[in-house]
Amino acid sequence: MKFSKVLIALAVSLSVGGLSNTANAAINMKVGLGVPENHFEVRGMRLFEKYVEEKTGGEIQVDLYPSTQLGSDKEVLESIKVGIAQMNLPGPAVLGGFVKDATILSLPYLFDTQEIADKVVDGPWGQALSKKLEKAGFVGLGYGDFGYRNVTNNVRPITKLEDFHGLKLRVMQNPSHIAVFRALGANPTAMALPEVFSACQQGVIDGQENPLKNISSNKFHEVQKYLTLSQHAYEWVLFVVGKRWFDKLTPEQQQIIQEGCDIAKDYMRKAVQQDDAEALEEIKAAGVQVTELTPEEAKRIKDTAWKVVEEEGNKVNKEFFAELLQAIDEAKASSN
């Protein structure tokens, strides 16, 4: 279904956005998700759905639409701004099209561990980024973990920096990622996620990069020969609702939605490691050759990319990027 048709159908069903909170009418909460039904994000959001509906006594009815049924994350965010959908879980790179500073969080080679990453987004820096969403018409209600991104391709195993050279890799529609992979010697090309499988299958691109669960749930391992555990970027999604819609809810309803997001977030943080481990076994079982970089080569690749990471972070917002690096240092110190 084309996005325009989705908008028309939803507009009719919601009767001017579904924003009224009358005594006898349930509030419809349409949630667009960019991952398939078998992804742990959807399982987390099923917990959200159950919690919100039970705690509000049915005052809020949550409808989940996995597999981009409401359109891409960018399209759902646009529909949220006009009140047609109410919630989305975009990655920082997608959200950066609406709030530029969000792209800083998607920069490669920032976080050494999940623990450090979670401390940063749960702390003052993450809260400051969430606050920035309000000017764009959104409310940020937390960060759901997606794990580290890794590279697959059909040309050769990537065991060293030089192996990136000339590979045509699909990357997110994010100028910073394009610049970083170009610095590594690859030929990066931005492409929407639903197009990646056929592009790999037909040889339009040599490979792509995604978290392990995304690789398995989208079946990319069926059309790729090599996986390198590059762990070049840690990935989240942000729990985003429309500000106009959220502001019309009662404080009690707002609190329940926040609590539901916390439940989904906590589930995702536990599930990401287990699901990634299971995804890796599935990928190996399909015959994909898996390579783990040596610490020396991983550092060499990071050092090559880091100058570009700094340039891109400063280009977006020098002060906010510096605050992020400081928050990372503080998280590292508290983890030791």
Image (tube, rainbow, N blue to C red):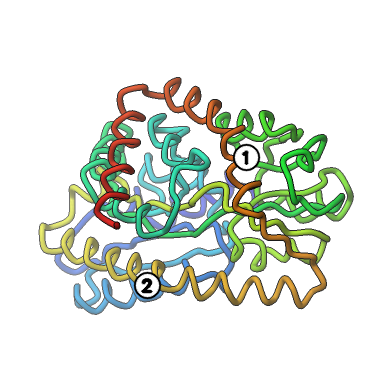
Q: Mark on residue 73?
A: none
Q: Name the residue nearer the viewer: 187 or 46.
A: 187
Q: Name the residue nearer the viewer: 42 or 21.
A: 42
Give the residue drawn at x 69%, y 41%: 191
Q: Split into 4 quadrants, where in the image is the C terminus?
A: bottom left
Q: Amino acid at mark 2?
A: Tyr
**Mark 2 secondary-structure assignment:** helix
Q: Mark on residue 267?
A: 2
Q: Position of residue 241 (x, y in %)?
A: 32, 50
Image position of 20 with respect to 312: above or below? below
Camera-side mark, 2 or 1:
1
Q: To which residue does mark 1 refer? A: 300
**Mark 1 secondary-structure assignment:** helix
Circle 2 crowding by C-alpha within 10 Å: few under 14, some 14–19, many from 20: some
Callout 2–callout 1 Cβ contact below 8 Å: no
Q: Position of residue 140 (x, y in %)?
A: 29, 48
Image position of 40 with respect to 125: above or below? below
Circle 1 crowding by C-alpha within 10 Å: few under 14, some 14–19, many from 20: some
Q: Position of residue 220 (x, y in %)?
A: 74, 61
